[in-house]
Amino acid sequence: MPLRYPNARLFLHDLLFRERLSGAQALAAGACCFELVPAQAVSEILLAPVNDDCRCLDTAAEIVEKHLALRHSAPNALIVDHKVVFAEIEKQARSNPDNSGRDTSKSDAAAGAALAGRGTTSASNALAGACHNHAPALFDIMLQQLMRYS
C-alpha cells in the first residue's frame, strides 16, 4: 500500500527529531493534533501496557481503539471492531517496504539482535530505535485505515 499522507509523516518526523519525542509519544501527539483522539486521551494511551518492545504498535492499537470508541458513540455511526482495523494496520506496516529505513521483512527480535551486534548496549534498546524510525509510516497507514471508516 502506498503512503498517502506526506504532511502527516513530516509532522511526525518533526515531533521525533525537533521535539525529541519517542515514537510512541509522537504517535499519540500526532493523533491528538489530527483530532483522532481528544487531548485527555493522550496520557491514557501512553500509560497502556506494552506487549512487546515496539511501543509504536501498542500505541497505534490504543489510538485505533479510542478513536473508534468515540466514533461509535455518534448517532448513525458505522460500528467497526478495532481489532480488525488494527490487524490490517499491523499487516500493512510489517509489509511496507518503505518504513523509514526499517527492514520489516526481519522479525523484530532479529532486527534488535542485528542492531545489538553493532555496538548497541542491548537488543531492546536497538529495537526501540527501529520502532522509533517507522512511526511516521505507521501513522500514515493508520490514517488511511481510519479514514476508510469515517
Image (cartoon, rainbow, N blue to C red):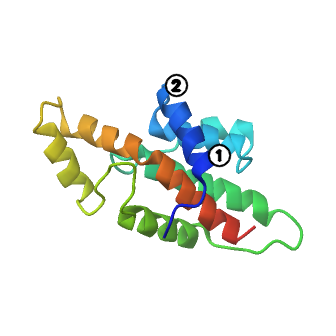
For disc 1, the marked residue is 31
Q: In which image quadrant can residue 144 be found?
A: bottom right
In the drawing, does residue 65 fall left or right of residue 55?
Answer: right
Dot 2 or dot 1, earlier in sequence: 2
Query: Which percent across, then down, holds residue 38?
Result: 74, 43
Query: Which percent across, then down, holds residue 138?
Result: 49, 54
Task: Say if 67 sits above or below 131 in the image.
Answer: below
For the point 50% across and 47% down, which residue is it? 136
For the point 69% across and 56% down, which residue is it? 67
Q: The residue tagged with tag 1: helix, strand or loop?
A: helix
Q: Amino acid at mark 2?
A: Arg
In the picture as drawn, the residue positioned furthest to the top comes out as 19
For disc 2, the marked residue is 18
Q: In which image quadrant can residue 43 be found?
A: top right
Residue 46 in view: no
Query: Which percent across, then down, holds residue 130?
Result: 32, 44
- Classify mark 1: residues with Cα within 10 Å, few (<14), some (14-19) or many (20+): many
Foreground mark, 2 or 1, reads 2
Image mark count: 2
Query: In the rendered view of the protein, which quadrant contains the C terminus?
Result: bottom right
Q: Amino acid at mark 1?
A: Ala
- The dot on residue 138 is none
For the point 69% across and 62% down, which residue is it? 68
For the point 72% across and 36% down, which residue is it? 40
Task: Say if 61 sits above or below 92 in the image.
Answer: above
- Classify mark 2: residues with Cα within 10 Å, few (<14), some (14-19) or many (20+): few
